[in-house]
Amino acid sequence: MNFDFYNYFFSSFSHLLILALIGVVLIQLIYYWTIFCRLAFKKIKPLQEVSHPVSVIVCARNEYQNLKDFLPRILEQDYPQFEVLLINDDSDDETDFLISDLTTAYPHFRAININRAVSFIKGKKFALSVGIKEAKYNHVLFTDADCKPMSSQWIQSMQQGFFKDKQIVLGYGRYEKRKGLLNHLVRFDTVNTAMQYLSYALAGHPYMGVGRNLSYTKSLFEKQKGFTSHYTIPYGDDDLFVNKAAKGKNSSTVYRIEAQTESIAPETWGAWFRQKKRHLDTGKYYRFATKFVLTTYAASSLFYYLLLAAVIILALNPFQLIDIIVISSLFFLRTTTQFIVFSGVCKKLKEKGLAWAVFFYDIIFTVLNPIWSFSNIIIKQNKWK
């Protein structure tokens, strides 16, 4: 059989689309096998003891029940020297009573009450800036009021990342597993996002972190002049700061289960919609190089499904066996690669029950992400609580 490559691909419009599909699949494979595989297959180092003092900072506004449930888990961490600093951001619930009780019970607990009316910095950034300024120690560790450490070794594990000249440690903040489609989508999206930012960091190109589990040095924060470069943006206290301050040499990742935090996932579609809008809207302020690689990956995913649907329709009319073989091979190669890498990431992060549905969830987010991005042009948000 004499197969003429040139005449086959350029003989019709459908074959041009197949050629384009090959190019898109190659782009996807490059991302999976050169970037995302770094997290999927990297070995976790044994836990070692560190002893530098740490200031844990939690910002809260009307989070009485979460603070009551989760703050003791932070205050009772197995670590030689640390303080827990609660920044009470103008709460009008029963937080003051809880602060009084915790101050009596835990000598390493402090609380600072702030009045957001005097703040010229929007959103959570003012509270965080106050907390960092008031922190006793150079190493600061951040989490949210609705987060609980996955172990008593959370502080110890996260501080493992401060070796050599590292000044930023990117952690993983998981969501609690519950029944229902919404919970599965939230958790899948969280793992998928972590696969990207942790893998890029492992490749020497950190671009974001999550405030649910993030640590850096006070000296770096001061050197970067805090949040002044993006203080007018009401969110992005985590990823915009990391995007600006993080470099390959000064950043590390810690994602072992002992170092993770867990939050209650958004329980309504509206709450999740607003959360996703904030994240995607913040992305437009990233460095150009970051936006380029992230946009290229997202665009290649979208065009992969569009081209796949188009070539399947065209290949069936009229039916050509060689077309079916090429299309099937591309689909199998990309889907198998995606499953292998994503399964490895789920195993590394101890996330169960998600890998089997990666193909279906990937289609859903490929459709939803452009919708969220477009909605940001129409609807703006300007507060964190």
Image: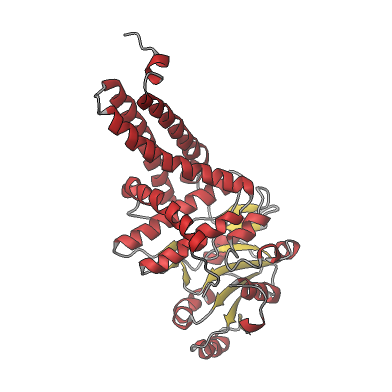
Q: How is the image coloured?
A: secondary structure
Q: Residue at x 65, y 73 (%)?
A: 121
- Comparing 47 with 222, the one in front is 222
Q: Residue at x 35, y 55 (%)?
A: 352
Q: Residue at x 69, y 71 (%)?
A: 137
Q: Residue furthest top?
A: 2
Say if 87 sits above or below 287 in the image.
below
What is the total number of numbered labels drawn onto the structure image? 0
Q: Position of residue 92 (x, y in %)?
A: 52, 88
Say if 128 sits above or below 203 in the image.
below
- Please say whether residue 74 is visible from this viewpoint: yes
- Comparing 196 with 117, the one in front is 117
**On the rendered structure, is 268 left or right of 372?**
left
Say if 109 sits above or below 266 in the image.
below
- Comparing 54 with 48, the one in front is 54
Q: Position of residue 379 (x, y in %)?
A: 49, 65
Q: Residue at x 65, y 68 (%)?
A: 232
Q: Position of residue 166 (x, y in %)?
A: 67, 54
Q: Position of residue 210 (x, y in %)?
A: 54, 61
- Comparing 329 with 323, the one in front is 323
**On the rendered structure, is 266 left or right of 131?**
left
Q: Residue furthest right?
A: 223
**On the rendered structure, is 363 left or right of 196?**
left
Q: Locate the N terminus and report the quarter of the image it occupies.
A: top left
In terms of image quadrants, where is residue 236?
bottom right
